[in-house]
Image (cartoon, grey):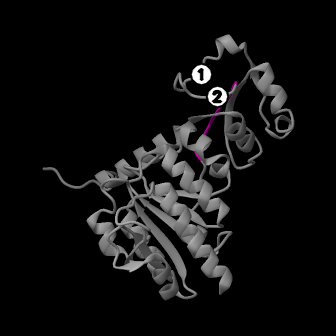
Amino acid sequence: MTGYSGTTKPTWVVDKERTKRAEAKETLWLFGIHAVRDALLNPNRDKLRLVLTKNAADRLADALPHAGIEPEIVDPRKFHVPIAEDSVHQGAAMEVRPLNWGKLEDVCISGKGNALVVCLDRVTDPHNAGAVLRSAEVFGARAVIAPRHHSAPETGALAKTASGALERQPYLRVTNLSDAMGTLREMGYVLIGLDGEGSVTLSQAMADAGTRAVAIVMGAEGPGLREKTRETCDVIARIPFADAFGSLNVSNAAAIALYAASVRQKAD
C-alpha cells in the first residue's frame, strides 16, 4: 500500500528549491569599461573574476582599489573570456553574480526615487531593456519590472546598453507579471498601458492619475501587450503622432512616458 509520506515534498516545492539552487550558481560576464567600472564600485555586486588588458587596467585604476578583487592582466591578443566574439569589451570583462534587489513590495513602496515604475511585458531584446533601465534611472523611477521568463535577463549586453544603470536601477524579474501588476494596484499604483490604439492620450492618462503612483506598462515591439496584461491595466494610452502613421522603439516610448510622469509628479 502506498500513500503520502510526511517526508515527501510536493513537486512544486522540489521545483522551487531546484530553481533557487540554480539561481544561486548563476553568473554572467559584464564587459566594457563603463559597465565594469560601475560594477567594481558597487558594493552589492558579488564579483568573481576580473580580466583586463594593461590599458584597461590603467583606465580603471580609480575603481580597482574599491573592488575587493585582483585583476588578471592579459595580452590583448589572448583575451579569452566567454562573451560573444563581436562584443566591444575594450579590454575589460568581469564575471559576477546577478544582483538581488529584494522584494517588489519593499522596492516599490519605500524605494528610492519617485512613486513610478515601468513594467515590461516580454521585452526580450537586451538593448531595449538596457535602454529602458537607463531612462528609468534618469527620470527617477523606483524599478523596472519584467517576467522572469520571456524577458531580457541580466547580461553583459544589457549592462553595456544601460551604461551603468544596471548597478543602480532596480531590475525586478517576477514570476507572473499580471500578479505583480495586481500587487502594484493594491499599493495604490495606477497601471497605464501604452499602445498605439489607446483610448486616451498619454498626457490625459497622466492627468487623470492625479497625484497617485504610476506604473507604465510596455509591450514588446510587434506583438505589443499580451491580452492578460492589457486587461490588468487601468487604462490604455497612446502617444500621439504628428502624421497619420507613426511608431516608436519601445525604449524611446518608455523614455517619453517616464518624462511625462516625472514632470507631472514634480508639478504636483
Q: Which residues are magenta?
A: 91-98
Query: What label does residue 267 carry, if any?
Result: none
Looking at the rendered structure, the secondary structure element under dot 2 is: loop
Compare residues 14 and 66 and report the one nearer the observer.
66
Q: Give the residue displayed 30% in from the left and 74% down from the top.
A: 231
Mark 1 crowdedness (10 Å alpha carbons): few <14, some 14-19, many ≥20: some
Residue indicated by mark 2: 89
Tell me which secondary structure the magenta stretch mostly adopts: strand
Looking at the rendered structure, the secondary structure element under dot 1 is: loop
Left or right placement of residue 120 versus residue 116 in this view = left
Residue indicated by mark 1: 81
Q: Is residue 249 above or below residue 231?
A: above
Q: Give the residue displayed 58% in from the left and 60% down from the top.
A: 102
Evaluate whether residue 186 shows in this view.
Answer: no
Does the magenta-highlighted stretch encompass residue 84? no
Quarter of the image for residue 230 reads: bottom left
Say if mark 2 contacts mark 1, CB within 8 Å: yes
| Residue 134 position within the rendered picture, expressed as x and y whole percent measured from the top left | 61, 54
| Residue 118 position within the rendered picture, expressed as x and y whole percent measured from the top left | 51, 65
Left or right placement of residue 78 versus residue 41 in this view = left
